[in-house]
Amino acid sequence: MLTFCVIFALLIISLALSTTIRQPQWEGVSEASA
């Protein structure tokens, strides 16, 4: 059950980060790191 909570928390954090990284100035950085 603890692992499920951790995965759920990571999902929420990743979604929050994706919304903030959608800015044009961060798209180049994400592409360069990838």
Image: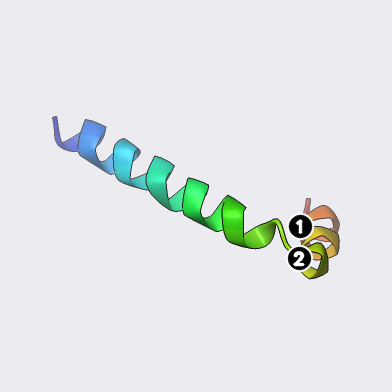
Circles 1 and 2: CB distance less than 8 Å? yes
Q: Outermost residue, left direction? A: 1
> Could you tell whether 18 is left or right of 33 in the image?
left
Quadrant position of residue 26: bottom right
- Which mark is on residue 26? 2
Q: Secondary structure at mark 2?
A: helix
Few, some or many C-alpha atoms within 10 Å of disc 1 (few <14, some 14-19, many ≥20)?
few
Q: Who is closer to the viewer here, 11 or 32?
A: 11
> Could you tell whether 28 is left or right of 5 in the image?
right
Q: At label 2, which amino acid type do we have?
A: Trp
Q: At label 1, which amino acid type do we have?
A: Ser
Which residue is at 39% across, 46% downward? 12
Tally of marks: 2
Q: Secondary structure at mark 1?
A: helix
Quadrant position of residue 8: top left
Which residue is at 41% across, 41% downward? 11
Percent x, y for residue 6? 27, 42
> Could you tell whether 19 is left or right of 28 in the image?
left
Q: CA distance from mark 1 to mark 2?
A: 6 Å
Task: Please give the residue where the numbered disc 1 appears in the rendered image.
Answer: 30
Which residue is at 73% across, 63% downward? 23
